[in-house]
Amino acid sequence: MNISFIPNHGVDHLNSMLLDDNGFCRVLPAAVVNDIPRDSFRLWCGQNAIYLYPTLELVEYLTAFIDGRNAIEVGAGNGHLGNALGIPMTDSGMQTRPDIIAQYQVMGQACTCPPDNVEIVDAVDAVEKYKPQVVIASWLTHKWEPGMSTGNMYGPDELKIIAGVDNYVHIGNDTIHWEKPCWSQPHQKHYHPWIVSRAGAKEQDHIAIWGIIRQ
């Protein structure tokens, strides 16, 4: 089901439950978030430009994976995940471009508006600047190339990101992110019920990891 076509039956009541006083997502157990009627949750996400909800289990998983290493988030958008992880957040600012805003208005979806603690810098440039060991991303649109049916001309070259770090971690969805060029590189993909996104096929939400997996 496309978010644009979910009947608007009013979801503002979810704000106090899901957002803190600073406008960031509360880190809640997945069971709490999953208990919200699915259509209501997806509509709320669409209205608030949220693609992935930072559940307690996801934050704990990523924190353990980072394990004190130098990490940044790219494509942070409104900064919900990076804020929960306590790592530097960067975003290209793509969704603040007038042409992109117009496209999203046609789809009936809100654009991200990075807050002050999200640095506006391209993902590849952010890796070159911060030289992180780990890069975290979620719902990151890859760079479009001729012949592709998905992607965006403003998207980053994820293959360059992978080449410059120990680990690249992307949280996404099989249906939405099926055409990423980085699938050609060795990776692991894991599915967990505590990955909570606004995707229609929730069972296809995954965490994908490139690079050496430490035991």
Image (spheres, helix red, strand yellow):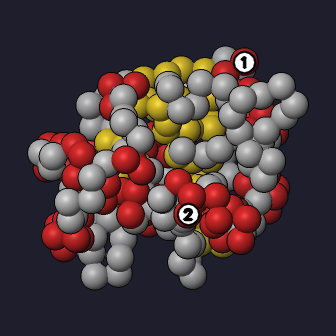
Q: Residue at x 38, y 63 (%)?
A: 47
Q: Residue at x 56, y 38 (%)?
A: 169
Q: Residue 213's spot in the image, x, y percent?
A: 55, 26
132 relative to 6 in the view: left or right: right
Three-letter code, disc 1 = Ser
Q: Residue furthest right?
A: 146
180 relative to 191 in the view: left or right: right
Q: Residues within 10 Å of mark 2 (few under 14, many from 20)?
A: few
Q: Residue at x 49, y 64 (%)?
A: 110
What residue is shown with label 1? 184
The image quarter containing residue 157 is top right
11 relative to 59 in the view: left or right: left
Tell me the SS state at disc 2: helix
- Does 35 sit above or below residue 148? below
What residue is shown with label 2? 105
Q: Residue at x 59, y 24 (%)?
A: 178
The image quarter containing residue 205 is top left
Tell me the SS state at disc 1: helix
Between 146 and 188, which is closer to the camera in this rendering?
Answer: 146
